[in-house]
Image: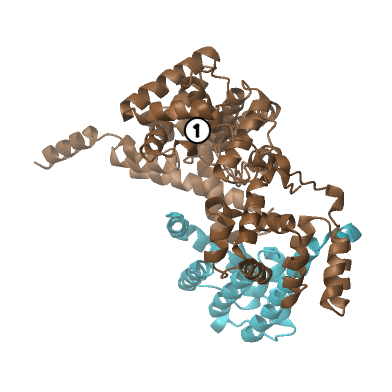
Amino acid sequence: MFWPRIFQSLHASVPELYTDELLGLNEQTRPYGVALTEQEIAMIMVARDQVLQSYGRVELGIDVTKEMVEQFASSAYVEQESYAETLMALHEIFYNLKNETEDRINDYQLIHMMKSLYEEECAGSIDLLQSRLEAYAEQCRVEAMTNDNDLEGDDAAWHLKR
Amino acid sequence: MASEEMNEYRGWIAERKVRRSRLTRHQYTIGLLQEGRHAGLLTSEETMRIQQGLMLILQELILRYTQGESTSVTTETAEDIMLSVLYATDAYLFGLGQPEQAIDCLKRMSIRDIYTQGVETVSQCFADTKQLYEDVSQTMVQVPIDAYRLTIDESLPVFLRKYGMIFHAHNTMASIDYPLAQDDMKLQGVFYMKQYLERLQLENTFCNQFDLQAILELLSHYGRMCRFDYRMELFNLFQLILNQSVFSTLCGGAPTELRISVAQYERLARRLASLSEDEIRTAITSALTIIQQELKLDHQLIPYMDGCKEELVQRVKHAAEYNSLDHVIVMERQSAASSRVISFDKADVMSSAQLRRLLDQIHSCASTEEKVKLMLQKVHSIHDYLDLLESNCLYGDEYEALFRAFGEMELAILAKVVFYEELRNESLVSFISAGSEEDRSEWQRHFVRFLRDKDQDALRSMDRCVNELDYEQLSFN
């Protein structure tokens, strides 16, 4: 099947459009002291595509990237020097979490949760954020497994639950 | 010079044609894009426009799929949705007939419109399939063949309930076990299911021309011939009846007559053994013509029947060569079990709770004798014995103590059920003396050892019991 290649080529076919959209967000983020250059945007897009490929995901559009920019630009822990690198690391955490939670959390909830943990518990540490979210993903998996098991079981248990 | 070369190149392009051999029903749109480019009927810009159009449809569907919750999905999900999109475009484009016409359509229409039309085609096919299912359900032959009944009563309704024509149009999400006489596995999704039902309906129509009692008798004789429980096996009823009808016609009987006596069989076997392959083909062709004329069959059924001819010719030729026509022609076999009537009452089967309680009681018994006594007292069905034995509630010598408490018939029933596969090909005596204990559960190993310790006369007597038992008598309902 050649679809993964086509999915990739689709991103490659509209980089200008994505760049313009992300450059447009600088207006909103400058008051917080951060902005992305064209070169940084290109780096972020390459890193995002690599992350998507390595986690076996497909994303048509850059809604997630835009939401991350909008949310994290206002963080007290984000600085201009490490802004692009932070965004790249956040993409990796985000798509890993989407897989690990088997898409049980919606994009916006997940980004908001990441922002909130990053600001509060993790005090701007990406490593800490990653480990907190891995623990969260583990908890999600256990809950999902418990729910699945509850649907099985013997006849008596089934009738009781109903 | 450059202009001449360009004209020559254009002429060469114009001469290239769509290679029909490279186009398959499956992934027809992709094939058309590739062949359209190859034949110069589609430009690279047009191909790119079509691909991007497909991607936009995919993008929208991903959002619909995640109900707006996520803009990304796993590659597998994206591929699955894309295959579903292509299934719809294939449906429309394939319906246009000629590939050149379909390529022209790809040039002129937007891929979104083609997709919308395709979804409409799939939807219509799904509606037709539902109607066909009603017809098949009504013409179902009342025979106790599990695969046939479960496919019609359970698997097909699951498909009709769960089929998703937007996200999973290409999936054939049903466990269709019952084999057709002629199946075309190249199709997928609802188109496969429609074709399956059309063919099943043809088969039902044919089978319903025969007396049900005669069909049931044929099945019994067939089960004895193959030494299996026909209710549990995967075979095609239509083919069995058709073949038997052919043989009956070759015996000089009526096409609707399915009974072939031993004497008739012997005459027919002698005749077939003396014929060459061509003569066998001629004889079978004539018999099929007689059947088709006398039964006044539907015009669609005739080519379907003819499609089964060559396989029958080869089977008969092969069997005649190896003197094994008695494995192809089903003759009336007296039920050896006439002297034995085994009765199983459904009411004797324990509920899960009763079984669990009994297991607890068995575990708390102090002695082997107590355990055996309790089991003999409480258990009255082969089902429950099998469940208890599989639950490993006995240890070591306790198995032997239980088997010793069984009578010859109980042991024969247990052997017939447990060694189902082995006893199809050999006798109990030879299986037990040569059979390996490997790959068996603990209780089965003890059972094999117990039988092996019996003397040859006792085993031979038990073997006779095994042969006298009909699987039809051993109900597993």
The one nearer the camera, A55 or A38, is A55
Determine if residue B71 is in view.
Answer: no
Q: Is residue B363 above or below residue B475?
A: below
Q: Position of residue B263 (x, y in %)?
A: 51, 27
Measured as percent of width and height from the top left, residue B31 is found at 38, 42
Apparent colour of chain B: brown
The residue tagged 1 is: B329
Q: Is residue B232 above or below residue A112?
A: above
In the rendering, at what x and y percent does residue B333 appear?
Answer: 59, 35
Residue found 54% across the figure and 33% down from its top? B330
The residue most toward the right is A160
- Label 1 element class: loop
Q: Colour in which chain A is shown?
A: cyan
Q: Nearer the viewer, residue B323 or B76?
A: B323
How has the structure been colored for display? by chain
- Residue A67, position as x, y percentages in the image: 64, 66
Residue at the spot 74% in from the left edge and 61% down from the top edge? B386
Q: Is residue B400 visible?
A: yes
Q: Quadrant of the N terminus of chain A?
A: bottom left
**B381 versus A125 height, above or below:** above
